[in-house]
Image (spheres, grey):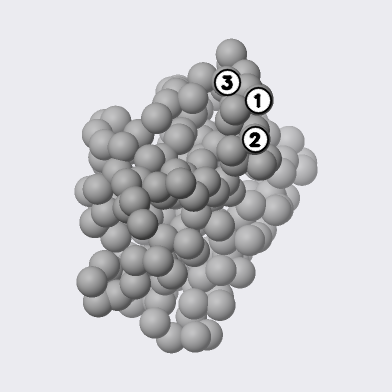
Amino acid sequence: MNNELTLCIDSNFVSPYALWAFVALKEKRLPFALKPVDLAAKQHHDADFENRFLTGKVPALLHGDFALAESSAIIEYLEDVFPAPAHPPVYPADARERARARQLQAWIRSDLMALREERPTTVIFRAPVDKPLTEAGRAAADKLIRVAASLIKEGADNLFGKWCIADTELALTLNRLVANGDAVPENLRRYVQAQWARPSVQAWVKREA
């Protein structure tokens, strides 16, 4: 098998889903190439791109002649194809903790829509906004904080004792509030700061492949 890996990402480096796939590759210490895709120019809707990746979405991964889209599918594929101990795991070893991590991933992708709309990732990677949260946005933020506070122990840097990909995903979601200056409990703010300092995340922030 041709083991060359290429990750297609948004050319603006603001997609949280692309960041999560990027971090998984970095944490698993896999060499890969980055291919920016101009979403504004609808390059992801080119016939060749859609035919290759089925859904025409980024992030998208090329592994030799195999093409795969959707961040959660990419992360689980990398974990299956490049397992420990040869490559560091991105999911917890414990079955229940692994299930909880995947629950968080699915929830972050499917809920909190008002928060995602009112605090887009541009508040993290570009500049904050000055509009207060709406009632729906505040309700989503409160739900996020409640869930995070129930899982992150006081002073903890990780969800399950050791880092996993759900930490990066949860921290980015919380950072929609933290980076914008919205109210977040101090222990969750410290958790976000610790996660954001990871070299894999900083490589994305600094646009280092």
Left or right of residue 112: residue 145: left
**Residue topped by disc 3:** 43
Mark earlier in primary sequence (3, 2)? 3
Q: Residue at x 23, y 71 (%)?
A: 86
| Nearer mark to the viewer, of 1 and 3 | 1
Please report contact status of discs 1 and 2: CB closer than 8 Å, yes or no. yes
**Residue topped by disc 2:** 51
Q: Of the residues shown, which amino acid type is indicated by label 1? A: Ala
Left or right of residue 15: residue 141: right
Name which quarter of the figure residue 88 lies in.
bottom left
**Residue topped by disc 1:** 47
Location of the N terminus by quadrant is bottom left
Q: Of the residues shown, which amino acid type is indicated by label 2? A: Asn
Q: Residues within 10 Å of mark 2 (few under 14, many from 20)?
A: few
x and y percentages locating residue 83 in the rendered image: 34, 72
Q: Of the residues shown, which amino acid type is indicated by label 3? A: Gln
Spatial separation of the CA atoms under disc 3 and disc 2: 13 Å
- Is label 3 in a helix, a strand or a loop? helix
Location of the C terminus by quadrant is top left
Q: Residue at x 41, y 40 (%)?
A: 7
| Nearer mark to the viewer, of 3 and 2 | 2
Residue 87 appears in view: yes
Residue 178 appears in view: no
x and y percentages locating residue 64 in the rendered image: 40, 47
x and y percentages locating residue 52 in the rendered image: 59, 38
> Which of the numbered marks, if any, corresponds to residue 190?
none
- Front residue of 139/27: it is 27
